[in-house]
Image: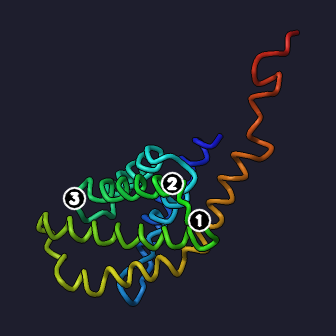
Amino acid sequence: MRGATTVLLLAFAVLLQAAVVNRLPLPWGSAPDLVVLTVVAIALGATPVSGALAGFSAGLALDVLPPADHEIGRYALVLCLAGYVVGKLHDSPWRSRAWPYLVAFGAALGVALGFATLGLVLGTPHVGGGTFLFVVPINVGITMLVSPVVLAPVRRLRRYLANGDLSDITDTPWATGGIRL
């Protein structure tokens, strides 16, 4: 059930990001990155490999969706690395109520800087010094502004579906073939 929940959450975040959020006419030219926050919420409750897989799949989906104006693989690479690092922080001794938001800040900053750096290295025409000075801080700030709306519900939903009533559906006789007529 946890795997299906993860896939549905990632698909919803990617579609919402590509179809709605990226098309909003925001005055500062940057939109919050809901996919980074979703990957962080998933990777905080998973292993590093699961976090990397979640980041890679979400990043690849963002790379190939039609409004993308960058090289395929840029988001996949940076979100894969972010998911892996966040998954490694899963068992951190410094956990507190603010821990998910601190991790999300680091991941949002790392993804924005990594994406911009890859664009600079690959020669993307609209990436320059202004990207690092203005676009990255605005993107991270907006992403952190919406982080309570994304992180808490995603983490709560994954925890509920993993530990709630639906988690032992495989123990029922009708699901395991134990009922004979």
Evaluate if marks 1 and 3 touch, with contact meaning CB atoms under 8 Å apart. no
Where does label 3 land, which residue? 71
Give coordinates of residue 44: x percent, y percent.
Answer: 54, 57
Q: Gap between marks 3 and 2, in whole Å?
A: 25 Å
Distance between the Cα atoms at labels 2 and 1?
14 Å
Q: Is residue 108 left or right of residue 4?
A: left
**Crowd tier of the residue under label 2, counting other residues whose Cα lies within 10 Å: few below 14, some 14–19, many 20 or above:** many
Q: Which residue shows up at 77% across the image and 47% down it?
A: 164
Comparing labels 3 and 2, the label whose residue is closer to the camera: 2
- Give the image location of residue 154, x and y in percent: 62, 60
Quarter that holds the N terminus:
top right
Considering only order in the chain, which callout, 2 or 3, is on the residue closer to the N terminus?
2
Residue type of the residue flagged with mark 2:
Ala
Question: Image height check: is 123 above or below 142?
Answer: above
Q: Amino acid at mark 3?
A: Glu
Residue 95's disc number: 1
